[in-house]
Image (cartoon, grey):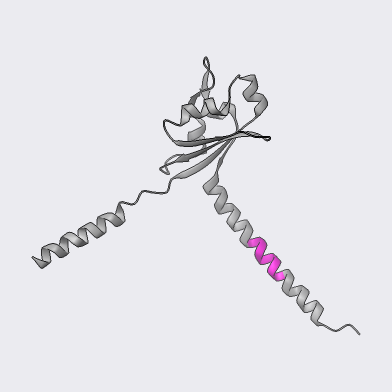
Amino acid sequence: MKNGLLVVFLCFFTFTGFSQNPEGKTFLVIFDKAELKANKTTTDFIELSLMHIFSTKAYNGNSDAAILVKIPYEGIDKKQLGDLFIRVNDKKVSPLSEIAIQIIDLDESKLTYSVLLASYEDRMLKSKKANKALKATPVP
């Protein structure tokens, strides 16, 4: 009986550990407001095409319009997202890459940013040490 409970507990513990969902990917899709106006559309309308498939959030403001797209799995890259057909307006359907100025993989960018930040901090630390050494030497 104890062995049976132990096996059930270990199986439950193992399966819960392996059943974690992968984090997924996050993309930032940037649009030119003039191009959206020429196509008689908005980011909210484009978001309607994507929100049934992915988790999205449209942003409008003083700068370029953008849509934040969260994909629950890691099988899609920038090119595949750009090849997705979306409804631009009531009459036109086209790939996302034709309407978007740029599609940015934020996870990839975060890794690049962290590497650049680490190298910058190393450089600053070295320059501070060099400056301290110069200040420590007395000037006759």
Tell me: 40 left or right of 135: left
Magenta residue check for 117: no
Magenta residue check for 122: yes
Q: Is residue 62 above or below residue 116?
A: above
- The residue at the point 22 percent across, 57 percent down is 12
- The residue at the point 70 percent across, 66 percent down is 124
Residue at the limit of the structure toward the left, as seen here: 1
Percent coordinates x, y for residue 125 in the rendering: 69, 69
Magenta residues?
A: 119-126
Q: Is residue 124 above or below residue 41?
A: below
- The residue at the point 74 percent across, 69 percent down is 127
Q: Is residue 117 above or below residue 127?
A: above
Q: Quadrant of the C terminus?
A: bottom right
Tell me: 124 left or right of 81: right
Percent coordinates x, y for residue 115 in the rendering: 59, 58
Tell me: 72 left or right of 41: left
Question: Which quadrant holds residue 61?
Answer: top right
Between residues 81 and 13, which one lies in front from this camera angle? 13
**Dominant secondary structure of the magenta stretch?**
helix
Percent coordinates x, y for residue 136 in the rendering: 80, 81
Percent coordinates x, y for residue 80 in the rendering: 48, 34
Q: How many marks?
A: 0
